Image (spheres, grey):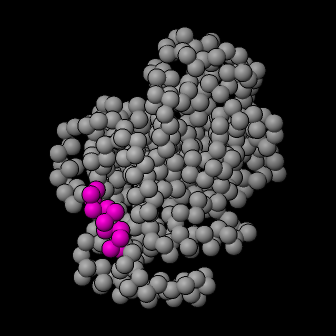
Amino acid sequence: MNKVVVGAQWGDEGKAKITDLLAQDADLIIRYQGGCNAGHTVVVDNKTFKFHLVPSGILYEGKDCFIGAGTVILPEYFEEEVQGLINDGIDVSRLKVSPLASITMPYHTEVDGYTENTSTKGKIGTTKKGIGPTYTDKYARIGLKIQDLYSLDTLEEKLDVILPLKNKTLEKVYGLQPYTKEKVLELCQKYAKIFEPYVCFEWQELLEKSRNKKVLFEGAQGVMLDIDYGTYPFVTSSNPIGGGAATGSGFGPKMIDEVIGVAKAYVTRVGEGPFVTELSNEIGDRIREVGHEYGVTTGRPRRCGWFDAVTMRYAVLVGGLTTVALTKVDVFDRFDEIKVCTAYKDNRNGKIYKSYPTDVYMHKYLEPVYETHKGWNEDITGIREYSNLPENCRKYLARLEELLEVPVSIVSVGPDREQTIFK
């Protein structure tokens, strides 16, 4: 079966660990969207690997890993990440990059940084890695793709169109320095060398050969950060949902058999935007410290809150989820009570919402409607069989299945590979 791993909340749900586990049975692992604004952590034999662009399946020998056309790549960051893997003794010869992936240029990171640093109202809370501006240029049809680096005629022709437009914007709108054609050509020459060992011009043949093999699609961020279905405008600039795997990889939707939504037993969020179940109190602080909730890419403390079944049901719908992998269940090992949000209440008129309200600007008037579950007060990190989980833990998981109407098929009880229960 071909599977897609999707973040079912606001990202940072533990997708890398689940992808890493499922990669054991896959022949090809494809990262289909996003850029180095994503951070995925995998722990193997007590060693921590942090991924930003490279599919986490690279840790297995004999697995082809492909960075698809739906991604945007900051060359210097890519080079640093790959070199780190080489230094750790990982074979990166199986890593391939689509020539259709978009390049994040220095002016993209400059614009991103300027926008975030000068915004007060409307601040998004980006990682300042130039992701949004890169996608903006992609859709404005003035972006550069990796394949452009290997044709001087193509590159010069595109720059003659792009640079007058970019420089006008850089100078007039942002007060930033313009770029000469010579400077950009010099940068592109450097980027061509970075990507040369990995760019796969035979990507069509690669996908064709994989039609009868097992493919794992790896997403970044999460459904609630999707550019179309997330908490717009506090979102990323691509489509992390299950449907994004088809457009970002080069495979059609018929290649997808299962969509696994990864969610924490609670909810976290990095950056700005609405978060109805956020706990700005000692309970939120406790979840953060026990769960080590700090961003992989930014190091920023994550906002923490109780599990939100309203957003999760929405994620099941628009994300195309067929099953759920629930991570960090062990964080609640010493909690007497655990709450689950089953609806929202509008404090202006008392209206109850069981379906997700997509107008995020009215979320400031919403408060969570909770139900309370008993904790289990027991260390579950060493448990490997579902039936051996404490009764209250199993009741909690069963209630989530009932609310979401999809099975919880994977339960993670710790960061290591073996700390995983397959139901």
167 relative to 250, above or below: below
Magenta residue check for 194:
yes
Give the total of numbered labels: 0
Q: Which residue is drawn at 38% across and 66% down?
A: 102
Quadrant housing the N terminus? top left
Q: Give the side of residue 264 with respect to residue 36, left or right.
A: right
What x and y, as percent, mark residue 68?
34, 55
The answer to whether residue 363 shows anywhere in this view is yes
Magenta residue check for 346:
no
Q: Give the side of residue 203 with respect to residue 223, left or right.
A: left
Q: Give the side of residue 65 with respect to residue 56, left or right.
A: left
Q: Residue at x 17, y 52 (%)?
A: 205
The answer to whether residue 351 shows anywhere in this view is no
What x and y, as percent, mark residue 364?
76, 53
Q: Residue at x 64, y 60 (%)?
A: 125
Viewer-side residue, 382 vs 262: 382
What x and y, as percent, mark residue 37?
52, 56
Q: What stretch is highlighted in magenta?
A: 188-199
Viewer-side residue, 154 vs 142: 154
Q: Residue at x 31, y 47 (%)?
A: 92
118 relative to 240, above or below: below
76 relative to 374, above or below: below
Q: Which of the 4 quarters of the picture holds residue 71?
A: bottom left
What x and y, as percent, mark residue 232?
60, 59
Viewer-side residue, 25 vs 406: 25
Q: Give the side of residue 251 with respect to residue 45, left or right.
A: left
366 relative to 411, above or below: below
Prevalent SS, magenta region: helix
